[in-house]
Image (spheres, rainbow, N blue to C red):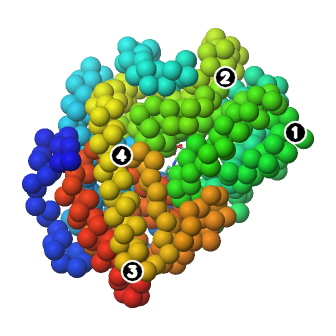
Amino acid sequence: MTGFSTTGADTTGAEPTTAATADVLTTTSTERSAAIMARARTRFPGGVNSPVRAFGGVGGEPFVAARGEGARVWDADGNEYIDYILSWGPMVLGHAPRVVLDAVSTVMQNGTSFGMPTGLEVELADRITARMPHVEMMRFTSSGTEAAMTIARLARAATGREHILKFEGCYHGHADGFLVRAGSGVATLGLPDSPGVPDALAKLTLTCRYNDLDAVAKIAREIPLAAIMLEPIVGNGGFIEPTADFIPGLRRIADETGALLVFDEVMTGFRIAFGGARERFDVVPDLTALGKVIGGGLPVAVYGGRADLMQRIAPSGSVYQAGTLSGNPLAMAAGIATLDALTRDVHEAITAQTARLVQGMRDLAARHGVPFTASHAGSMWGFFFRAEPAINFDDAKQSDTALFKRFFHAARRRGVSLAPSPYEAAFMSAAHGDREIDETLDRLDRALGAALAGRD
Ligand code: KE4
């Protein structure tokens, strides 16, 4: 597949500006990045506005982004990288896609926020329901945290029950009740769970190991659950897929015990399948959270599902949730343009590129003789330095995280931007053409050799 040029620039022929032929980036310097971070540390905790960006999981100086275009990002010192963080999932078309820039530029001429309904919200909602018919009714928020926390509130109101079951390593945003054995930055920083969460609240969140149906059945029989909530494919404990019987089993247990089944698809939505987890696993949840891709890089998330449940949300019902910038017209425009460009054919093409990268990584790891497992679902992928696939977060934690850290830095030095944590998934975009995949595999091959030799 040639590069999906979404920025107007021909990404297939462009010569990378960094000396990619050298083994490591002939980096100009890191002075500008370091100077920015020195100032940032006087303004923000850890110098960042979200913990995982601080590189706590891998050490070293954080990446200070300056610009992105297609599959590539440049740091504040002008070093170029092929990017697989992609803003932790949203940039499914690549950075600065022309279709999104044009849509947002057009809409912003009419104003940027009204605090009133606009037609754009309905346009984006129609596109979501067209691909996920189980999301019969929905409500936009500005973050996945708001979407997930409201689902918890709604599930408790609808069932009259208080306990929610989540899975170790899954992350559903930073609302108090979810910071219990969570994944993502909580796991990356090895936080025992977050101080400040009242015990009385934490006790209402039960956890068990992902893929452990027996444990779920036991808990659900003993304690009335408002909801069983999961990432249909874990992206916040590293990339962990469900066993074949897991999600159908959760549906059965939820139906038998009166709990609601909730898919947190903030990360998996429009990535693991064109129609998300319902299409991939043929299981219909009662409620769903979405985010990231549906905002095309602007702050958008949504919660929705069965209309009879959603009608309980104010002002139709009495379950309260609100947001000043919910349904923001610029964010709606970015989401509409993204989903319109993300056709089934484009999704399949990105999936094929992801498959090529994952297989290429398996092959290079085998050549180096290192225990390695990698997998993907659609345009979301991940890997661990361990021999067998991880089926739960305990498995993920037993991977070779020391080698991951060396590999991460060696890859960065060779112009590949991976997530700075073994407990994060990676992503692919429509802008990653054959050239980017080939360059990536060559650079990662050399990076792994350096990491195994203890070199940078
Ligand atoms: P936000 O509040 O960050 O928009 O969404 C929270 C959230 C909810 N559910 C899932 C499955 C998620 O992956 C997320 C956020 N994902 C992380 C990446 N692992 C966001 C990156 C960050 O925290 O900086």
N-terminal of the two: label 1 or label 3?
1
Q: Secondary structure at mark 1?
A: helix
How far apart are the alpha carbons under marks 3 and 4?
26 Å
Q: Which residue type does callout 1 highlight?
A: Arg
Provide the residue designation for mark 4.
351
Provide the residue designation for mark 3.
368
Q: Is residue 281 visible to us here?
A: yes
In the depicted structure, whether residue 376 falls above or below residue 278: below
Q: Is residue 372 left or right of residue 358?
A: right
Q: Which residue type does callout 4 highlight?
A: Thr
Query: Which label is found at residue 24?
Result: none
Q: Is residue 260 left or right of residue 14?
A: right
Residue at image point 74% right, 33% down: 252
Along the line of sight, the residue nearer the viewer: 111 or 252: 252
Provide the residue designation for mark 2.
320
Residue at image point 21% right, 47% down: 1
How far apart are the alpha carbons under marks 1 and 2?
30 Å
Label 1 close to label 3 by CB (< 8 Å): no
Provide the residue designation for mark 1.
221
N-terminal of the two: label 1 or label 4?
1
**The image quarter in which residue 102 lies:** top left
Q: Is residue 207 visible to us here?
A: no
